[in-house]
């Protein structure tokens, strides 16, 4: 797994438009294709994988286990992947759980967990992961 690019550039402030309503609980949905956030990831399989999903977490607090959002509404899945399979995806939809949110990184996790949990998968469920540092300010 490789994170190829993220948008916007580090240091940017992302203003969530007022038409994207914030709900308690649940946060604000940034729809796919909105142009506000983007993570481009290349994935590959080195062994047979019956089912897989890509989750991208918006890290906060400078850690790899605290996050303020994820790609809940733009989380692609695949089935029956064979060794040598490869694809590149552009994730653009996110649910942000708290505003404001100071994003300190993107954590992409390619995993085999198929139970609907939103929390990051554990090590035995994870195929591959990658993290890239950034500094973004997500505001209303």
Image (tube, rainbow, N blue to C red):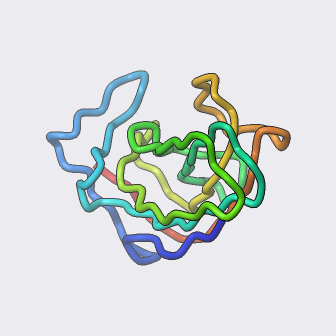
Where is residue 7 shown, x and y percent of the image? 39, 70
Where is residue 113 shown, x and y percent of the image? 68, 33
Q: Farthest residue toward the right?
A: 124
Where is residue 40 shown, x and y percent of the image? 46, 67
Quarter of the rendering occupied by the N terminus: bottom right
127 vs 16, nearest the viewer: 127
Q: Could you tell whether 134 is left or right of 33 in the image?
A: right
11 vs 34, nearest the viewer: 34
x 59%, y 54%: residue = 59
13 vs 125, nearest the viewer: 125
Q: Could you tell whether 33 is left or right of 11 in the image?
A: left
x 62%, y 42%: residue = 80
x 63%, y 28%: residue = 114
How many numbered marks, from 0 up? 0
Taking 18 as reference, is 139 above or below it?
A: below
Q: Could you tell whether 123 is left or right of 13 in the image?
A: right
x 40%, y 44%: residue = 74
38 vs 53, nearest the viewer: 53
Taking 87 as reference, is 80 above or below it?
A: above
Where is residue 125 shown, x and y percent of the image? 77, 39
Q: Could you tell whether 111 is left or right of 54 in the image?
A: right
């Amino acid at each position: 797994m490789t994170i190829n690019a993220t948008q916007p550039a580090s240091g940017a402030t992302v203003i969530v438009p007022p038409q994207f309503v914030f709900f308690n609980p649940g946060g604000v949905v940034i729809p796919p294709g909105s142009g506000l956030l983007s993570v481009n990831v290349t994935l590959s399989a080195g062994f047979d994988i019956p089912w897989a999903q890509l989750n991208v977490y918006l890290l906060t607090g400078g850690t790899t286990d605290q996050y303020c959002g994820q790609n809940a509404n733009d989380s692609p899945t695949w089935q029956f992947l064979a060794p040598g399979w490869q694809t590149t995806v552009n994730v653009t939809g996110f649910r942000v759980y708290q505003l404001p949110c100071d994003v300190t990184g993107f954590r992409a996790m390619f995993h085999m967990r198929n139970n609907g949990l939103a929390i990051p998968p554990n090590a035995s469920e994870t195929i591959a992961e990658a993290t890239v540092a950034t500094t973004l300010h997500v505001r209303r």
